[in-house]
Amino acid sequence: MTGPAPDRPGRRPRYPGKNPRRFAEKYKELQPDRYADDVARVLAAGKTPAGTHRPILVREVLGVLAPGAGEVAVDATLGFGGHARELLLAVQPGGRLLAVDADPIELPRAEARLLALGTPPGSVVVRRMNHAGLAAFLAAEAPGGADMVLADLGLSSMQVDDPARGFTFKADGPLDMRMNPAKGQPASILLAKLSIPGLARLLSENADEPDAYGLADAILVAHARKPLETTRSLAEVVRARSGRVGDDAVRRVFQALRIAVNDEFKSLDAFLRSLPACLKPGGRVAILSFHSGEDRRVKAAFKEGLDAGQYASIAPEPIRATVEEVRANPRSKSAKLRYAVRGGPP
Ligand SMILES: C[S@@+](CC[C@H](N)C(=O)[O-])C[C@H]1O[C@@H](n2cnc3c(N)ncnc32)[C@H](O)[C@@H]1O
């Protein structure tokens, strides 16, 4: 065991000192090389070590994508690089991994992890971009198309866990929520521009919020009194309105705002439309979604592609995480995996 005496049960191992101020100073897990035992304890407790992301449904994703030596694999949501690592190794020798992500903070770290695997020069190409533009990227990097494309939608654990990114209601931070903090507007500015009906529509459409109008009213009245600029201030307003079911409502409000801030459905729709043209004949696509707004779109796009003859087959039903995976990684509980296979040459 490294470091001082074990913490009380249930507490995650931290650096010495009572009140570390910054996320980066808080958890030993952020330095996995120095604190391997602590990382193992966190994993054994069914939690994700801070600063990492555990890939979901890996066996099932590899099953439907069936990567083979020499193939071109695309990861449209690189994140920590867990799925990408498996794809890159599975297409060796001779294969390539092309990976994109919108997040400029995590991307270089994921790229370094992939390069450290030591596959041949040129076998890894990483680009910071929105996957709505995947077709143009592939036209330059793999004009013949990809043998497989993976998208694991939503946020990585690193993004959610870092309070400075403003995605979590479990710690205080700026109300930001941008996947790329250099682009667009933070959630606090979006709130200032919304009307009550506009916010209510967003809560309902992006997160199926049952009390959409009531919450929109409470949030914007509070915002007019004193601008909600922190995650805690927004969470408190939602809890005050929602009472006992407060945290479920907070989760839905944060999800709805995050989707709006990053225009996630617009990107997903463009990505789904571009997919048939990104794949070689016989190419496979797998998409992991985490809520109904995403899954509805994936399901409909695959069905339309099947009806139009662009896909030869699609998943009849979504594939879900096993009970064991959900126990080991609760974030897999809501995941739905759908796949489609591009038809052969006409
Ligand atoms: C769930 S994580 C992916 C985790 C990854 N599969 C792994 O094994 O580490 C989702 C990632 O997709 C990225 N992302 C979400 N929407 C995107 C978009 N429209 N374009 C590019 N990247 C996006 C996020 O920044 C995040 O890093």
Image: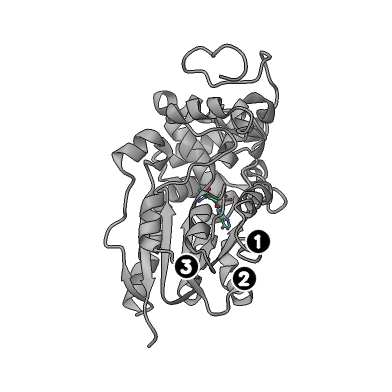
Residues marked 2 and 1 touching at CB (< 8 Å) = yes
Residues marked 1 and 3 touching at CB (< 8 Å) = no
Depicted 270 relative to depicted 117: above or below: below
Residue 79: image location, x then y, percent: 57, 49
- Residue at image coords 54%, 14%: 7
Element assignment for label 1: strand
Element assignment for label 2: helix
Of pointers 2 and 3, the one earlier in the residue sequence: 3
**Mark 3 nearby-residue class (10 Å; few <14, some 14–19, many ≥20):** some
| Amino acid, disc 2 | Phe
What residue is pinned by disc 2? 137
- As measured in the structure, the alpha-carbon distance from the residue carrying label 2 to the one carrying label 1 is 9 Å
- As measured in the structure, the alpha-carbon distance from the residue carrying label 2 to the one carrying label 3 is 22 Å
Q: Which mark is residue 127?
A: 1
Of pointers 1 and 3, the one earlier in the residue sequence: 3
Residue 126: image location, x then y, percent: 64, 60
